[in-house]
Image (cartoon, rainbow, N blue to C red):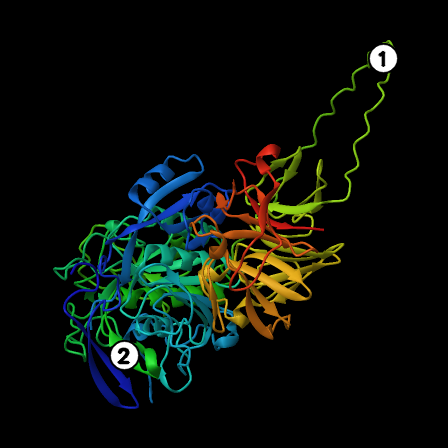
Amino acid sequence: MSGWLRGFGFLVTLTLAGLVLLLLLSPFPDAPKTATAAGDVIPGRYIVVLRAGVNSAGFAASQGVRADVTYSYALNGFAAPMSDAAAAALSRNPNVLSVEPDRIVTIDFHTNPFETLPYGVDRIDAETPGNTTGNTSVGPEAGIDTAIIDTGIDIDHPDLNVDGGVRYVWNGSTCGSGSFDDDNGHGSHVAGSAAARDNAIGVIGVAPGARLWAVKVLNSSGSGALSCVNAGIDWVTANAATIEVANMSLGCACSNSSGNTALTNSVNAGVIYAVAAGNGGADGIGDDASSSWPANHPNVIAVSAFADYNGAPGGGSSTCSVSSQNYGPDDSFATFSNYGSVVDIAASGVCIASTYSGGMYATLSGTSMASPHVAGAVARFKLETGYSGSANGPDVVAAMTAAGWTTPQSGSCGFTGDPDSSPEPLVWLGAPCSGGGGLTPTPTPTPTPTPTPTPTPTPTPTPTPTPTPTPTPTPTPTPTPTPTPGPPILYFSLINNGTVGGLSVANEDIVAFDGTYFSSYFDGSAAGLNSSLVVDAFAILGPDDILMSFTTDVGAGSGYIPGISVAVDDSDIVHYQAGGFSLYFDGSDIGLTTSSEDIDAIELVGGNIHLSTTGSFTVNGLSGADEDVFVCNNPTTGSTSACGSRSLYFDGSDVSLTADGEDIDGLAVAANGNIYLSTITNFSVSGLSGADEDIFVCNNPTTGSATACASWTLFFDGSQYGLSFNDLFAIDLP
């Protein structure tokens, strides 16, 4: 087996109330059988990056591809299963920037009630919270938020302040959602080094008590897919207004152009990333980190590891208390650590005691363990100095160095044995060491520059005007009156920005059609919606009164939906009324929690909510597919939503809507009971076929588990109005 997690097993030492347990864990028992090691390609799965402005879900559907992960913040694109031929064809599409195979990534650690000062924290002199601003604590109220992109975090650990999180874990077919609790231990260990509480139990982190966000992208064996890691970065970027620092103690010896795009955009959004440099190859010796992602990304802080066994500089102790974790002499470069010019900073990564899953504590080694020391130091640096400069990793390290928050390898607090010719500094939060480094108690104020006076410009002479000759009058033409649209017969939204009937339409807008003319009914940007939002389902209740759902998850406090401060998922429904927005229906409350259960059609009939989803759904015993419609009867709406009962309204498979592209994405029910439908790609039913820009009608339907239509008719042919290269994404009737 290759990759950074090697061997037939690894030893982890766990401590709980003085009890020591040795567990032999087999690596990768839950990983896909066809791709298990870091960097392995996942057969038949690709990551696609699109140009800005192209709707990822809609584009994928228009190409006959079923995207199971979409990206909207850190990058624009999706991940999906597809053949090599389909991937090659997509790569030639002018809307596509890149197509690459999905790959396996793994955690970056090498091996293997009291309150202990861990050697890693002690070695960088971070045990006492800094006081450059007079603070004596950087606990939960300090306003520092750090994301741990890893195996999750033990959400109940008494030594960790977990504020929330998300799950994107590769399950062999997609990036599954659900609990972000740690079922491995690695993520909890990383979290503790960064931010374990100073609370008289367990251990202390570099930034004690900082708020932690668990971004679970790796499974119980510590492996996952690049596409899921990208989704985690995308989520962090969506929440960049809250999350200031992120740690990634994972990677692979592989390229990841989509991940590079995601990281660049996330850093540009203001998130500082500390990442593990990696742990070398199967020989146990470190390699050049330039071949390891994400360490080779130019905008992150790549962290190497050195060995320390006593929490103090200058050598002195030769072994770790856990005999299996001796990776070089005290205060020397760790034998397993990657190195090279892409590495920005070093921290202790050998014999590190920290928090672990199950409320326990463990001693681990690896660049995984070094990186969170830097993440915690960056959080402290931002808090204590008020740093608000660039989030670009090398710029952050330069600012820390200038302020005395690093110390050189060659100084008395440094270490030896770095195998390259570009010695990175050591993160350092203590007093200055001989040879440089250390916090300067009173920074020298920067003098205020004397402003340079702006010269008074020489006045330009006013030219003498030339008389304008009187023109020969031109007869005024009689204007042609602009036609007034009649009463609408149809409302719709588009999957991509475009033009219909001379009307320019964005995909956050709703269009009204009277049978001849098109007009704007709802202007999303004028209502304050962020332009990245796409209306993929709506139901018009009355004038200035609309229910709608979006393709994109919206983070809490993002400001993307005016008036809504809570997170809004793509399985939720928002109410727009009298110019304001509110949460109308929380899909997760009725069990719509997976990526396939995103709402893509809404209709309200008799107060009951009719819904279709982007994929298969299960809600309290009722299951169906993406061509089906189910009903939430007697609903309770608002932040705590419920259905009195659930029933199947329309079974698409009964009427031959069975192909992959025949997913219902537009639904309206007329007063006479006829069902108006649109699909994500071309459709074919008895005696009628059409495209994704069309609307067709199930006349005199029999609804329920044995659905039937007495006849089918075409209601709207989008190709007649120039929509052949777009898609009706949602529909409703007056």
Disc 1 or 2, which lies upstream in sequence?
2
- Secondary structure, mark 1, is loop
Q: Which residue is mark 2?
A: 362
**Is residue 328 shown left or right of residue 71?**
left
**Is residue 360 shown left or right of residue 632?**
left
Residue 552 vertical position relative to residue 695 in the rendered view, above or below = below
Q: Nearer the viewer, residue 201 or 213?
A: 213
Q: Is label 1 or label 2 in front?
A: 1
* Crowd rating for badge 1 (residues with CA inside 10 Å; few <14, some 14–19, many 20+): few
- Estimate the spatial distance between the alpha carbons at disc 1 and disc 2, rounded to whole Å: 90 Å
Q: Position of residue 537 (x, y in %)?
A: 59, 54
Residue 474 — which label? 1
Residue 492 vertical position relative to residue 634 in the rendered view, above or below = above
Q: Position of residue 615 (x, y in %)?
A: 46, 58
Q: Nearer the viewer, residue 498 or 361?
A: 498
Which quadrant, please, contains the N terminus? bottom left
- Secondary structure, mark 2, is strand
Q: Position of residue 468 (x, y in %)?
A: 84, 12
Q: Nearer the viewer, residue 615 or 561?
A: 615
Residue 434 vertical position relative to residue 57 in the rendered view, above or below = below
Query: Can the viewer see residue 14 in this picture?
Result: yes
Q: Position of residue 363 (x, y in %)?
A: 25, 77
* Crowd rating for badge 2 (residues with CA inside 10 Å; few <14, some 14–19, many 20+): many
Q: Residue at x 30, y 54 (%)?
A: 295
Q: What amino acid type should be assigned to the residue bearing mark 2?
A: Ala
